[in-house]
Image: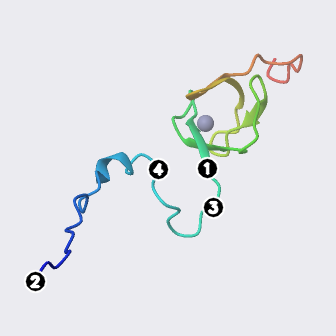
């Protein structure tokens, strides 16, 4: 009775290797980019194709924020343009 039974040797795949990329939960196909507003610390959603030095607006405090870097996403207060409306 030479049953050629092969036990699968690699049953337990190292699941920790797959934890880095969580599957899309809740139907979010694209990975949302978020950063914290330096002014009010609110979470600001960034476009997936946002570029460095782009200016976005915080939806919470309305500040103009410049994208300083993307890896990781860092926002900084955009230099005020020539709009002295507060004089
Ligand atoms: Zn803000």
Q: Earlier in the sequence, mark 1 or mark 4?
A: 4
* The one of 30 and 40 positioned closer to us in this rendering: 30
For the C terminus, the quadrant is top right
Q: Earlier in the sequence, mark 4 or mark 3?
A: 4
Kindly state the secondary structure of the residue where label 2 is placed: loop
Q: How far is disc 1 from disc 4 in space, using C-alphas?
A: 13 Å
Q: How far is disc 2 from disc 1 in space, using C-alphas?
A: 58 Å
| Residue 46 percent across, percent down from the top left | 68, 42
- In the picture of the structure, the residue carrying the numbered disc 2 is 1
The disc label shown at residue 21, or none: 4
- In the picture of the structure, the residue carrying the numbered disc 1 is 32
* The one of 77 and 45 positioned closer to us in this rendering: 45
Q: How far is disc 3 from disc 1 in space, using C-alphas?
A: 9 Å
Q: Earlier in the sequence, mark 2 or mark 1?
A: 2
- In the picture as drawn, the residue positioned furthest to the left comes out as 1
* The one of 23 and 14 positioned closer to us in this rendering: 14
Kindly state the secondary structure of the residue where label 3 is placed: loop
| Residue 43 percent across, percent down from the top left | 55, 43
Callout 1 touching callout 4 (CB < 8 Å): no
- In the picture of the structure, the residue carrying the numbered disc 3 is 29
In this rendering, the count of numbered labels is 4
Residue 1 in the image: above or below residue 80: below
Q: How far is disc 4 from disc 3 in space, using C-alphas?
A: 12 Å
Looking at the rendered image, the disc whose residue lies closer to the viewer, 3 or 1, is: 3
Q: Earlier in the sequence, mark 2 or mark 4?
A: 2
Q: Residues within 10 Å of mark 2 (few under 14, many from 20)?
A: few
Callout 2 touching callout 1 (CB < 8 Å): no
- In the picture as drawn, the residue positioned furthest to the right comes out as 82
């Amino acid at each position: 009775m030479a049953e050629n039974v092969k036990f699968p040797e690699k049953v337990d795949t190292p699941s920790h290797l797959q934890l880095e990329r969580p599957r899309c939960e809740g139907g979010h196909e694209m990975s949302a980019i978020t950063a914290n507003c330096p002014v009010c610390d609110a979470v600001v959603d960034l476009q997936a194709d946002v570029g460095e030095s782009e200016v976005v607006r915080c939806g919470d405090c309305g500040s103009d924020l410049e994208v300083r870097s993307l890896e990781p996403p860092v926002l900084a207060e955009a230099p005020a343009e020539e709009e002295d409306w507060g004089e």
